[in-house]
Amino acid sequence: MRRTVNMNAFLKRIPAALAAAGVVSLAWSQGTPPVATPLTPAAKPAAKEAAKEEIDLKRPQGQPLKYELPPIDPKQVPPPQAIDPRVSVAVPDRWRIMELLGQKQNWWDPYNINTLKGDKPFQPFAKWGSDWFLVLSGISDTVYEARRLPVPIGAQSSDRPGAVDIFGNGRSHTFNQNVILSIGVIKGNTTFKPPDYEFRLVPVLNYNQTEAREVRLLRLNPQEGKIRRDNHIAIQEAFVDVHWRNVSDRYDFDSYRIGIQPFISDFRGFLFQDVPFGARLFGIRDNNQWQYNLGWFRKLEKDTNSGLNDINKAWRKDDSFVFNLYRQDFPVFGHTTQAIVLHNENREGKQVYFNNNGVQERPAVLGDSRPRNYRVTYFGLNGDGHFGRWNLTSSFYAAFGRDQRHPLAQKPQDIQAFFAAAELSRDFSWLRVRGTAVLASGDKNPFDDKATGYDAVFENPQIAGADTSFWIRQAIPLVGGGGVTISSRNGILPNLRSSKDQGQSNFVNPGLAMLGVGADVDLNPQTRIVANLNYLRFMNTSSLAVLRNQEIIKKDIGWDVSAGFQYRPFMSQNVILNVSAGALVPGKGMKQLFDEDKRGVQYSVLANLLLTY
């Protein structure tokens, strides 16, 4: 049933009804708004009579105004019930709601719901609770590297007729393949708070092959030739992390972690970045404004050719005790300041250690080559963040300690050394430009009672181009000066160690001064170009002159020029291709050390493919 309202009849009643109420008299004409005037007492009876009459009002077009109401159906609104029960559908947990809505999962898809990536509870752990998660990751890290370094000839075992010079053919190339599997089991809802428990295991399978042009470079025994093939299985992480307590309603907390675990002492890995065995207490305060770490770490022996942990060998007698404290938004918003105290105790003074290639690593082959102990304490202040549009990373360390008996001085020495580094950069949309400065003190007199050359515990610096830089990437042997390198692989300090991975710290070294500029250019979300130009020089060359038994060597190392290309086809970290090249244009000091006028530029070329699941 429909009801039809005659708008003409409805509208013409309005003025009469208002007038009948004794309120107003409405008068209007076409095109003008209505005008309201109060009724006089004498006009009120006439208005009541007019309300009973019909006045014919029409639109300007002349058609009557009509409005149709929707049909009335009483059945559409049921009467209220005395008891209205709540209808609900049971689900196993809140993480599986999307499954009930029909969304499927694929084990190979890390971007959508995936039980193997920790998006939902793992059912085999259900007997221990509904909030246990499994997190699996896999990485394939493939590296090919070609280089030219200053190397010695093969001595009496050389297979090249007429090879009577000091320096040999320094070209070599390496293929290295790592397959990394990360297995994590986590208890707790980590969306708003730290996990209650975390168990992690990271095994690594490695294969490497290196080919050189001289014998006895890859292995001590010349009969093993100029090609070395090796493989290794390592455990890079194996720890348990326990959430001890919450100390505020903002989930400020204390936790502890025990086992083989990664640790970095500062923002850029200048002092200590490794995966040792350790016990660490850490937490946050004041709504994450303060963070702290308190820990003990013992170095594990490294595999010689892969640089990975070798748990089949006895742990090293090298302990580090660390306390660091972070303060966010200090001294300005967007900048974090960190203070650190690290004490390193090395007690390897009663043993001689040879690596897998038959070469003596500890003690280093310099001076009288006698084993030694040392202890050193580092006091550091580091910063990372931005001041307005300027980004700044800074680091300063002072090292104090005691070397029981240095092989050059052949007596105890007091360690007094320092290190400073800074990187200032600014972003201009797709372009970042930066300037870099590094200063590490050098030793003035190898035979006195002070060791003033700075060295780190286990550095892995991320500055001045890092992997693209020739100086940082390559280990440059000190040919004719003992079985040590000027600088270690993946290190910036000219510390005269046998190696970074298996050697001991050495505080009698030439030190370093470096100034550099660089730029990162993002051509598009997939492609980045990196370029760096660094000038390097020694702080003091007394130790080099003693080891080489020659006149004072010039301090000029030279210019390190490098460039790199990074391609991410899917705009994510799942597939990354890095290609880079670096070269060291020798200065007067390097020419004196390695006769570089005749041999040209030292260089390295690197290709790296990372595949991540």
Image: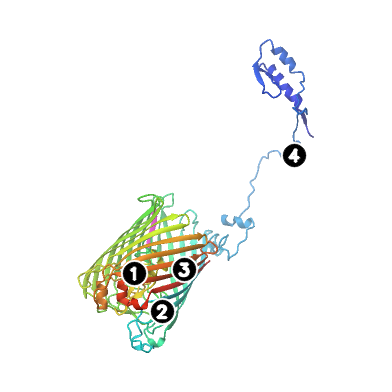
For disc 1, the neighbor class at 10 Å (few under 14, some 14 to 19, many from 20) is many
Q: Earlier in the sequence, mark 3 or mark 2?
A: 2
Q: Is residue 510 above or below residue 73?
A: below
Mark 3 highlights which residue?
Answer: 201
Q: Give the residues in magenta.
A: 280-284
Q: Earlier in the sequence, mark 3 or mark 1?
A: 3
Label 4 residue SS: helix
Q: Is residue 395 above or below residue 308?
A: above
Looking at the magenta stretch, what is its main secondary structure?
A: strand
Q: Earlier in the sequence, mark 1 or mark 4?
A: 4
Given this view, does label 1 or label 4 mark the residue nearer the observer? 1
Q: Residue at x 41, y 86 (%)?
A: 224
Residue 497 visible within the image: no
Q: Earlier in the sequence, mark 3 or mark 4?
A: 4
Q: Amino acid at mark 4?
A: Lys
Mark 2 highlights which residue?
Answer: 171
Mark 4 highlights which residue?
Answer: 75
Where residue 22 appears, as percent x and y from the top left, is 67, 16
Where residue 296 appears, as percent x and y from the top left, is 34, 65
Residue 386 visible within the image: yes
For disc 3, the neighbor class at 10 Å (few under 14, some 14 to 19, many from 20) is some
In 3D space, how far apart are the residues under numbered discs 4 and 2 (Cα atoms)? 92 Å
Where residue 104 appears, as percent x and y from the top left, is 62, 60
Dividing the picture into quadrants, the one containing residue 213 is: bottom left
Asked if residue 283 lies in the magenta stretch, the reply is yes
Given this view, does label 1 or label 2 mark the residue nearer the observer? 1
